[in-house]
Amino acid sequence: MDITIENILLIGSLLLFVSIVVGKTSYKFGVPTLLLFLVIGMLAGSDGIVGIYFDDPKLAQFIGIVSLNFILFSGGLDTSWKSVKPVLREGLMLSTLGVLLTATSLGVFVWMVTDFTIYESLLLGSIVSSTDAAAVFSILRSKNLSLRTNLRPTLELESGSNDPMAYVLTIAFLTLVVNQDQSAWSIIPLFLQQMVIGCIAGFGFGKLSKFTINTIKLGFEGLYPVLAIALMFITFSATDFIGGNGFLAIYICAVYLGNQDLIHKSTILKMFDGLAWLMQIVLFLTLGLLVFPSQIVPYIGIGLLISLFLIVVARPIGVFISLMFFKMKLRRRAYISWVGLRGAVPIVFATYPLLAGIDKANMIFSIVFFISVTSVLIQGTTLSVFANWLKVALPEETKKITEVDRLILDLPKSSFQEFVISPHSYAANKRIVDVKFPKSAFIVMIKRGKEYIRPGGSTELLENDVLMVIADTQDDFIEVNSCISG
């Protein structure tokens, strides 16, 4: 079946519906949801039951890049700086040195066991060197794992920030494969340019995005998530245009925004949470359609060998050497090395050799696909088992509720108080977003004379306004009073 304008909406909506329904029940059998999406795409493909013919790596790459924008941006918005700050150095070491060591050790192994050249081997190693943000975010949160002492922030920080490093290595070694006369040292300026410009642009666009969201008056709450989407794509494309790493820029931009006071922040977070799931489904379905299972069968043996080496040797080498300068128990390092999930990102990166037209592009794509599937299947289904075995899991009732959870889930508060804005109050004639109320307290209503006003971040507080505030503890109310009085 060929995809046409007439049937694309029907086919797409049916695949999406089936994916959601099947994914809802998949964890009863211990199968990661993302793998189910991939399998559904394969079954719908040309070698599957439905027989949809899709063989367009360029379109698949475009869909992959757009999806990764949403996934990384959503992951960045959900990242609490308070929880990440204590593990910032560990996370950065894992996302840079750890990725480099994983790529080189796996590349050398591939060079030894195949007829690949050293640059082709390192290209394959680079493509699968990063942990997949979509896989890690979705599996950790779907399994509702509660981990000891900063393990979860470390894993989420690493998975959200290491794709840029893998992307730079992939582009660098692809350049060396295509241009055999270039020296390996020639990729160092490219690496530095991509990372430095990406960091600066991400922080700069983050500050600009905050100013834009809090300053512009749109009139409709539903337009603010749309504005955030526009700013996300501007950040990615503008950074890429000036030679920086767009993936790194949007992640840094999102982390900055997620830890600021924004107008209609709850609405923005909820929208991106849903869009991230949608993009994960679309991404895995698309990559499933792109794959021809009959072309993968000849590479099952070598693919399994490389995948096992990546899981039990290359990934642990990258983790243990990267963390050797930090105080951390052996079992925690072992768990971090096990949560080296490869998902859709390596498959997206594997489309670059296809589009470049190098000799072994199809073989690389097939091996990468096999590695991603086995990683999600083997590691994704055993995260809880290894967490309990290594004694790094906490009982579910001890799991902390994050501020992002509070915003998204609208969790109820236990106490209520009213505060009056006096004529000499610091908060008088200021917008709510500019007063910087504690994140653990919410203004549910404002009484102004005989009127009751539903508050928003852009609502201006006037003299004699009565704020109806809900919070959890008395300390929260003391902090609210401090913000109001100045």
Image (spheres, rainbow, N blue to C red):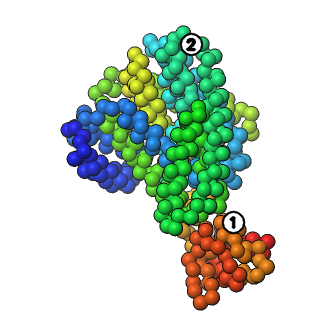
User: Where does the C terminus fall, quadrant-wise?
Assistant: bottom right
Q: Residue at x 66, y 80 (%)?
A: 467
Mark 2 = which residue?
182
Q: In this view, does 186 lie above or below 369?
A: above
What amino acid is at disc 2? Gln
For the point 59% across and 31% down, the residue is: 243
Q: As rendered, which of 361 and 7 lies closer to the eye?
A: 7
Q: Which of 296 and 250 is in front in this view?
A: 250
Q: Which mark is residue 434?
A: 1
Tell me if I can see residue 335 in this picture. Answer: no
Q: Which amino acid does label 1 sit on?
A: Asp
The residue drawn where x is 40% and y is 40% is 63
| Dot 1 crowding, Cα within 10 Å, few <14, some 14–19, many 20+ | some
Label 1 or label 2, whichever lies nearer to me, is 1
Q: Which of 211 and 397 is in front in this view?
A: 211
- Left or right, 347 with respect to 317, comes to left
Which quarter of the picture shows residue 146? bottom right
Compute the Cα span from label 1 to label 2: 53 Å
Q: In which quarter of the image is the N terminus?
A: top left
Which is nearer the N-term, disc 1 or disc 2? 2
Identify whether 268 is placed above or below 109: below
Side of 278 relative to 208 (left or right) = left
Task: Determine the secondary structure under disc 1.
Answer: helix
Tell me the element at label 2: loop
Question: Residue 60's x, y, as percent?
Answer: 38, 36
